[in-house]
Amino acid sequence: MQDAAVLKGTNDGYEIILDDEADLNDVFAALRKLLKKLETQTATGSSQPIAFDIQTGLRLWSADNRSEIEKIFSKFQLFSVHKIISDVITKEESARILEQESVHILDRVIRNGQIIHIQGDVLFLGKIHEGGKLIVGGNVYVLGDVHGVIQAGYPDLEDKMIIGDVHNAQQVRIGEQHEILDDTNQKITENTVVYVNDLHVLDYGKVEDLKQINPKFFNQIGGVING
Amino acid sequence: MGKAYVITSGKGGVGKTTSSANIGTALAMLGKKVCLMDLDIGLRNLDVVLGLDNRIMYDIVDVASGRASLGQALVKDKRFDDLLYLLPAAQNTDKTALTQDQVVQIVNEIKPDFDYVLIDCPAGIEQGFMNAIAGADCAIIVTTPEISAVRDADRVVGLLEQHPLKEEPHLIINRIRTHMMKDGSVMDVDEITHHLGVALLGIIFDDDAVITTSNQGEPVVLQADDPAGQGYRDIARRLEGESVPLMQMKDEVHPSFWKKIGNWFKKG
C-alpha cells in the first residue's frame, strides 16, 4: 500500500503529498515516520534547514488538524512548513471570494442616512443622495450620480480606486484616506481616477493615465487573488 | 373599510398638522367620513387647528390603556354632521406611552366605520414615527422647498423603503413661494419630485390665510377662493381618484407702469 505521506521533489523545493483518502491518524503517523526517516538521512549530509510545501489534496482540513501538522514539524529542528496547499475550500469561503472578486452592479437610490456596504468591486449606476453612503471593499466604477459619500477599499485597502464622475460627491474615501471635496480645488471631471499615491495621500488622475497610476490593476482582472 | 394614511415629513414645522387638518376637512366636504388621529403625543395641536381643543374628554393613550372606549375618546366636528372626527393625542405623557401594536389595534378598530383615517405623525424618526407608520396603508410625505426639509423627506422615504407600507408614498410640497421658485433661489416642484422619486400628490402655495384661519380653529379649505385651500381641496379630490391638474404658478399681481397710468384715466 502506498504511504499516506509521500515526499516529492519539485522545481521549487520539496513537497509532501498527504493522501486525502487515508484515515487522518494514518496520515499523521505516516508524516511522522517520513520526517524521521528524512532526518536520519540528512543528519549525515548537510544541515541546511528545509521548508516543505504540504499538499493536502481534496480533503478539507480544519484549523485544529492544520496545527497538528505544525506540531509534528516542530519536533524536527531542520524542517518547517512553507505552506499548506489544498485543492478544496468551504462553500462559505468560496462565496466570500466570489463576492470579493466579482463586480457587483448596483442600480438604486441611496438616500440620506442610508449606508450600503458591499464587498468586492461595484459598478454604480444609481444615485447617491446627499447624506447617503456607499461603502465598498474593492474598486468603485461610477456611471451614476454621486452627491453623497463614496468609499473604496473599505476598511483599509489603499490600492483600490474610484473611477468615474464624483465631482458632486460630498466626500471620497479610499482605505483610511478621505477628502472633503469642498476643500479641494483639484479639478474633477467625469473621467477621474481617485487613488492613493505613494505618499499615502488621495490623488486625482485621468482614466487615460490609469496604467501609470496603478499598473497592477490590469493584472488583477479575471483572477482569484486571495484564494 | 377605510384606508389609513400617515402624514409625515421627518422635519418639524413643514405643515404636517395643518395638512392633516385641511385634507381631513376637504375629504369631509366631499362627503367622506374621516377620522383624524393625532399621534404627536406630548405636543398635541391638531385639535387646536381644528378648533376642537375645548371638547376633548379622553385621548389616544386612554384608549390604548383601556381607560376609555374609542367612542368616548373620538371628538366630533359639529360643522360636518357626522363626517369628521378627531382622536386626540395625550399631553401629559410622551411618545413611548404607545406601542406599535396598540396603534395598529386602534387603527383597525377605527377603519371599518370610516372612509379615511389620517394619522398625524410627530416630527423625528424615532418611536413616534414608527408608531405612526405602523398602522398606515400609505404615507403622505410633506416637504417644503427648503433643502433641509427635502433632505429629511429623503431620509423618511429611505425609512419607508425599509418598512414598506401597502402602497407607494405620495408627496405634498408645501409653502411654495412663487417668486422664489421662479427666480431659482429654491428647488422647483419638478426638481424636488424628481430628486425624491415620489409621486406628487399636490402643491400648496404659501399663504398668510393658512395661519390666520388655523389661529381661529377653522381650516383654510373652508375659504372658497383661497389658493392654499384650493390646493388642499385638489389633494382631497386626487385621493378620491379624480384627475385634477396641478395648480399653475401665477405671478403676483403687479400692474405694469402703463396700466397704472391707464387706470388714472379710467377713474377720471
Image (cartoon, coloured by chain):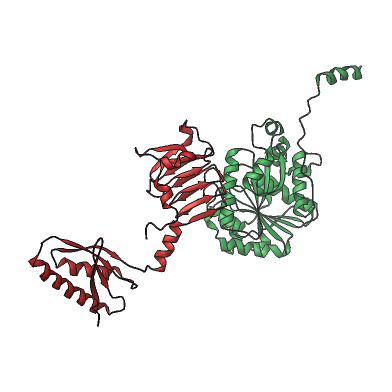
Q: Name the residue nearer the viewer: B189 or B54.
A: B189
B180 above or below A32?
A: above
The reply, left or right, for residue A67 in relation to residue B28 is: left
* Percent position of residue A216, x then y: 39, 47
Q: Name the residue nearer the viewer: A217 or A197.
A: A217
Q: Name the residue nearer the viewer: B265 or B179.
A: B179
Q: Residue at x 38, y 38 (%)?
A: A201
Q: Give the position of the C terminus of chain B as an image quadrant.
A: top right
Q: Colour of chain B?
A: green
Q: Residue at x 48, y 45 (%)?
A: A150
Give the residue furthest to the front. Answer: A11
> Is any part of residue A205 visible from this angle?
yes
* Percent position of residue A146, x then y: 54, 43
* Percent position of residue A71, x then y: 19, 68
The reply, left or right, for residue B258 in relation to residue B20 is: right
Q: Quadrant of residue B175?
A: top right
Q: Colour of chain A?
A: red
The reply, left or right, for residue A143 in relation to residue B231 is: left
The reply, left or right, for residue B208 in relation to residue A114 is: right
